[in-house]
Image: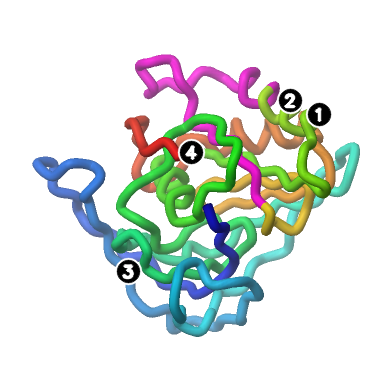
Amino acid sequence: MSEYGVGVTLRSLACAALLAVPLSSLFACGGDDDSSSRPADGVDGGSGEAAAPVCGEIGAPEKPAASCEVTIESPPIAGVRHVPEGTPLTYCSNPPSSGDHYAVWAAFQQYSAPVDWPYLVHSMEHGGVVLLYKCDPPGCPEIVDALVKVRDEAAADAICTDGSKRIIIAPSPTIPTKVAAAAWGKTYRADCVDAPTLSAFVGENVGKGPENLCAPGRTF
């Protein structure tokens, strides 16, 4: 599948979900962001033209001690609307950590091919953490194995009754570093798999989305 890049931000507004509606069809609300903003570099998140990217300022990054350079940031929340699949979308950070997204989310599992950002962002909205890697040339089993170990050693997910964890592993040709991770409102970038800082990122951010759910998603 195609990968999505960086883009436009919307101010999130809270809306009540109707309990009688299936999870896959729940909608949230958002509005234009009138606060100070900056353009974000990146590519369109769908077919056709997207709105001009205007994104809120990201604060000073965290640079924890690690075996390689690690950068952790907290991009402003950039929208929460559910939009039809195929809608052009762009995001404010790379990897994205919030924003409008499709009404379908990606299942919490490992993938061998890239998954489109609007599905992954919805998984983050449900409290998921996405672990990403970029191989050049393709094929980096040592990185994949290290990410799998981080997932396997993560604490059990208290709300996943089937014993699963809200962690996704997938390749991404568009992330700026060899390794990245994202959760709702948080991003992580590194040039290696630094297990201590990546494991801490997972532990601190899983279950932190505005919809704290562990429900089956779509497998890609």
**Which quarter of the figure is the C terminus placed in?**
top left
Which of these two is toward me, 127 or 102? 102
Residue density around tag 1, few if under 14, some if 14–19, many if 20 or more, within 10 Å: few
In percent of width and height, residue 75 lies at 59, 62
* Amino acid at dot 1: Glu
Q: Is residue 152 left or right of residue 161?
A: right
Residue hosting label 3: 30
| Marks 4 and 1, the one that precedes in the sequence | 4
Looking at the rendered structure, the kind of residue marked 4 is Gly
CA neighbours of label 4 inside 10 A, class few (<14), some (14 to 19), many (20+)? many
Question: Is 91 positioned to the left or the right of 191 in the image?
Answer: left
Segment colored magenta: 149-172
> Is residue 206 within the magenta segment?
no
Q: Quick check: marks 1 and 2 in contact, CB under 8 Å?
A: yes
Residues marked 2 and 4 touching at CB (< 8 Å): no
For badge 3, the amino acid type reads: Gly
Q: Secondary structure at mark 1?
A: helix
Task: Please give the name of the residue rendered at 60% of the width and 31% of the height, measured from the top-left corner.
Answer: 203
Residue under label 4: 128
Residue on which the image places disc 2: 145
Q: Nearer the viewer, mark 2 or mark 4?
A: 2
Label 3: element kind: strand
Dot placed on the residue nearer the N-terminal end, 3 or 1: 3
* Separation of residues labelled 3 and 2 (CA atoms): 38 Å
Q: Residue at x 65, y 18 (%)?
A: 153
* Mark identifier at residue 142: 1
Q: Are marks 3 and 1 in contact (CB under 8 Å)?
A: no
Circles 4 and 3, Cβ within 8 Å, touching? The answer is no
Residue 202 placement (x, y as % from top left) = 61, 34
Give the distance between the C-alpha atoms of the residues marked 4 and 3, in whole angstroms.
21 Å
Label 2: state its secondary structure: helix
Tell which circle, 2 or 4, labels the residue nearer the N-terminal end.
Answer: 4
